[in-house]
């Protein structure tokens, strides 16, 4: 299955306080690079050369100025504006025409992880027409979407459960077959008023079409002051593999 990449780099970044008063959080530094370089370099390193970046209206010009056509990175970049925050799945829905008839690899722009993307894609390629997610064992699963795992199967997925059934967080790294956009169109907003990516994954799970790979190296988001500092520490101590 041919693949295209989608980087989701929207959101207000309000949890980062003054740091995002005049900029998008994905333009903040993580190690020697702006945060958004990390998912971009992961995709290019895995051979994905057609990439869509989705962000809000306020700072789209900054992304274009920073990344340009993608030539400097060895890829072709397309940009799409998310007019208002409506959740990860809503942002993914904006990639429908870009990913028409092909698989899409989606990375949340604030996810920082050590492993290269290639092994994840190789695992997913063994199960044609399946969705695939990355999972990582964490000490605080209540903060994340949580996958209940048995052997090589996912039994259930819950979004930020009060009593997690496992310590496997669903990382912001996904691969979807072309029919994902049909699923997005059926979603209804959650109690947060957003279209949740967990609901997308649950649809594939109910169809018996959801697989996973476990990340072996570090993984963190960088959406809070503490996690941004932690991401910088991890990257400085052990640079990620692109």
Image (cartoon, grey):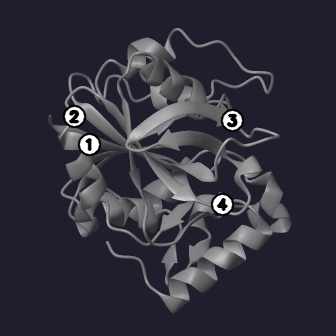
Residue 43 drawn above or below residue 160: below
Which numbered marker is on residue 7?
none
Cβ atoms at labels 2 and 1 below 8 Å apart = yes
Mark whose residue sits in front, 1 or 4: 1
Cβ atoms at labels 4 and 3 below 8 Å apart = no
Residue bearing mark 2: 127
Q: Earlier in the sequence, mark 4 or mark 3?
A: 4
**Within 10 Å of the Cα at label 4, are there few (<14), some (14-19), or many (20+) other Cα atoms?**
many
| Along the viewing direction, whichever of 142 and 75 lies nearer the viewer | 142
Residue at 57%, 82% in the rendered image: 234
Q: Distance between the residues labelled 4 and 3?
A: 23 Å
Q: Where is residue 47 in the image (x, y as percent from the top left)?
A: 18, 57
Q: Earlier in the sequence, mark 1 or mark 4?
A: 4
Count of number-bearing discs: 4
| Along the viewing direction, whichever of 66 and 178 lies nearer the viewer | 178
Residue bearing mark 3: 159
Cβ atoms at labels 1 and 3 below 8 Å apart = no
Q: How far apart are marks 2 and 3 (CA)?
A: 25 Å
Q: Earlier in the sequence, mark 1 or mark 3?
A: 1
Taking the view exactly as shown, the residue that stands out farthest to the left is 1
**Within 10 Å of the Cα at label 1, are there few (<14), some (14-19), or many (20+) other Cα atoms?**
many
Residue 22 drawn above or below residue 161: below
Residue at 66%, 28% in the rendered image: 86
Q: Distance between the residues labelled 1 and 3?
A: 23 Å
Secondary structure under badge 2?
A: loop
* Horizontal arrangement in the rendering, residue 224 relative to residue 112 (left or right): right
Residue bearing mark 1: 124
**Within 10 Å of the Cα at label 3, are there few (<14), some (14-19), or many (20+) other Cα atoms?**
some
């Amino acid at each position: 299955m041919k693949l295209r990449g989608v980087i989701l780099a929207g959101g207000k970044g309000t949890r980062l306080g003054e740091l995002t008063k005049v900029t998008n959080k994905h333009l903040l530094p993580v190690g020697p690079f702006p945060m958004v370089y990390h998912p971009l370099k992961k995709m290019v390193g895995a051979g994905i050369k057609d990439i869509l970046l989705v962000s809000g209206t306020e700072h789209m010009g900054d992304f274009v100025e920073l990344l340009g056509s993608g030539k400097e990175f060895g890829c072709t970049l397309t940009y799409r504006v998310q007019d208002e925050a409506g959740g990860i799945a809503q942002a993914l829905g904006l990639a429908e025409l870009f990913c028409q008839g092909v698989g899409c690899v989606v990375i949340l722009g604030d996810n920082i992880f050590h492993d290269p993307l290639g092994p994840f894609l190789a695992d997913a390629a063994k199960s044609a027409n399946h969705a695939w997610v990355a999972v990582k064992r964490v000490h605080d699963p209540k903060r994340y979407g949580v996958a209940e795992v048995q052997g090589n199967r996912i039994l259930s997925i819950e979004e930020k459960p009060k009593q997690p059934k496992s310590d496997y967080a669903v990382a912001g790294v996904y691969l979807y077959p072309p029919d994902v956009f049909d699923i997005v169109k059926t979603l209804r907003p959650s109690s947060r008023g957003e279209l949740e990516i967990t609901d997308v994954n649950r649809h594939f799970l109910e169809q018996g079409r959801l697989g996973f790979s476990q990340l072996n190296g570090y993984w963190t988001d960088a959406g809070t002051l503490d996690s941004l500092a932690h991401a910088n520490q991890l990257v400085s101590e052990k640079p990620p593999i692109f």
